[in-house]
Image (spheres, helix red, strand yellow):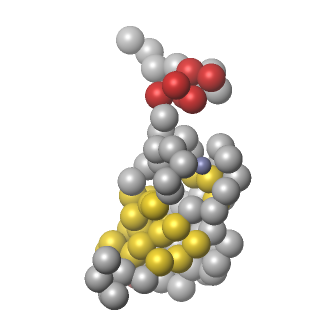
Amino acid sequence: MPASHKQFRSGERILESGIYRVVHRKHRLPHEVTLLRDQLFPRCIKCEDDVFFQLLRSAPDITLAPFKVALYALPVADEADEAESGFTVAS
Ligand SMILES: [Zn+2]
């Protein structure tokens, strides 16, 4: 891993808005999330365990967007868990 890819973890304050890569070994999560400065890195909503993040692309202008991303926990990307939680996809 390149030294420039500093890792952050759940509960730390986000110093830079941008796109972050999600690193979580226990199960699948979305690979990339958009996070805003001054919030805290979210933890996993499933196992409530720490998740690690690497800044892929900083996006300082994101705070000027008409919407605010308030992500306090990561959604689960695992298909089986989607069924468990009652999340269904119309077909
Ligand atoms: Zn998890």
Name which quarter of the figure residue 9 lies in.
Answer: bottom right
Residue 70 visible? The answer is no
* Relative side of 56 to 67, left or right: left
* Relative side of 87 to 6, left or right: right
Above or below residue 59? Residue 87 is above
Name which quarter of the figure residue 61 lies in.
Answer: bottom left
Residue 7 visible? The answer is yes
Spot the residue most to the top.
91
- In the rendered image, residue 17, in percent from the top left (x then y), is placed at 46, 77
- Quadrant the C terminus occupies: top left
- Quadrant the N terminus occupies: bottom left
Which residue appears at 45% of the width and 60% of the height? 22
Above or below residue 87? Residue 72 is below
- In the rendered image, residue 24, in percent from the top left (x then y), is placed at 50, 56
Which residue appears at 43% of the width and 49% of the height? 30
- In the rendered image, residue 78, in percent from the top left (x then y), is placed at 48, 35
* Relative side of 16 to 1, left or right: right
Q: How many marks?
A: 0
Above or below residue 16? Residue 35 is above
Spot the residue most to the left.
2
Which residue appears at 57% of the width and 62% of the height? 51
Q: Nearer the viewer, residue 1 or 84?
A: 1
Which residue appears at 54% of the width and 48% of the height? 26
Above or below residue 17? Residue 50 is above
Q: Nearer the viewer, residue 90 or 44?
A: 44
- In the rendered image, residue 32, in percent from the top left (x then y), is placed at 39, 58
